[in-house]
């Protein structure tokens, strides 16, 4: 007699093999059903769809996510050192400010709030 753990391991193997065989044998049925369903939606469902083009209920709803995040006004004063490339410095500052705002937008999107 085999140990119970080996017997149950074998049952697990048989169960997985059974699932595999069942899926392989019936996958065509599932695909056929999905295809028929999608055809029915295409034939019947699309003709009844109406698009609501009315103005939003919220009068001042932001038109995009960037507007919906509270973006403060930032003033940066940088005094360039001698021999410093001002354009390169401006590009670096711009990239950091953009990175900051992208992080703020990302935090807002991940905050479980209704955005729309």
Image (spheres, rainbow, N blue to C red):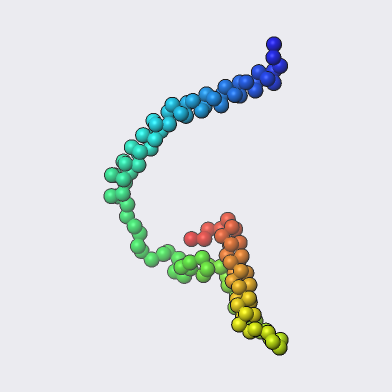
Answer with left or right where residue 66 lies relative to residue 8: left
Answer with left or right where residue 115 lies relative to residue 3: left
Depth check: give the residue in front, 69 or 8. Answer: 8
At x 58%, y 62%, the residue is 106
Q: Looking at the figure, which quarter contains the N terminus?
A: top right
Above-or-below relation of 90 to 18: below
Q: Position of residue 96 (x, y in %)?
A: 63, 72
Task: Decide if residue 9 is in sight here.
Answer: yes
At x 52%, y 60%, the residue is 115
Q: Residue furthest top?
A: 1
Q: Residue furthest bottom?
A: 82
Depth check: give the residue in front, 50 or 56. Answer: 50
Q: How many labels were placed on the picture?
A: 0
Quarter of the image where one finds residue 11: top right
At x 47%, y 29%, the residue is 23
Q: Position of residue 37 (x, y in %)?
A: 35, 39
Quarter of the image where one finds residue 28: top left
At x 35%, y 38%, the residue is 35
Task: Decide if residue 74 is in sight here.
Answer: no
Above-or-below relation of 41 to 22: below
Quarter of the image where one finds residue 33: top left
Above-or-below relation of 12 to 65: above
Depth check: give the residue in front, 115 or 96. Answer: 96
């Amino acid at each position: 007699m085999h140990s119970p753990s080996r017997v149950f391991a074998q049952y697990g193997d048989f169960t997985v093999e059974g699932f595999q065989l069942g899926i392989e044998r019936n996958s065509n049925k599932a695909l056929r059903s999905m295809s028929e369903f999608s055809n029915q939606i295409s034939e019947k469902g699309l003709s009844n769809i109406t698009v609501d083009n009315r103005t939003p209920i919220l009068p001042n709803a932001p038109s995009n996510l960037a507007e919906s995040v509270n973006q403060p006004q930032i003033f940066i004063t940088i005094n360039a050192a001698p021999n410093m490339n001002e354009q390169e410095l401006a590009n670096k500052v711009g990239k950091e400010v953009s990175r900051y705002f992208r992080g703020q937008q990302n935090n807002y999107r991940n905050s479980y709030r209704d955005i729309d």
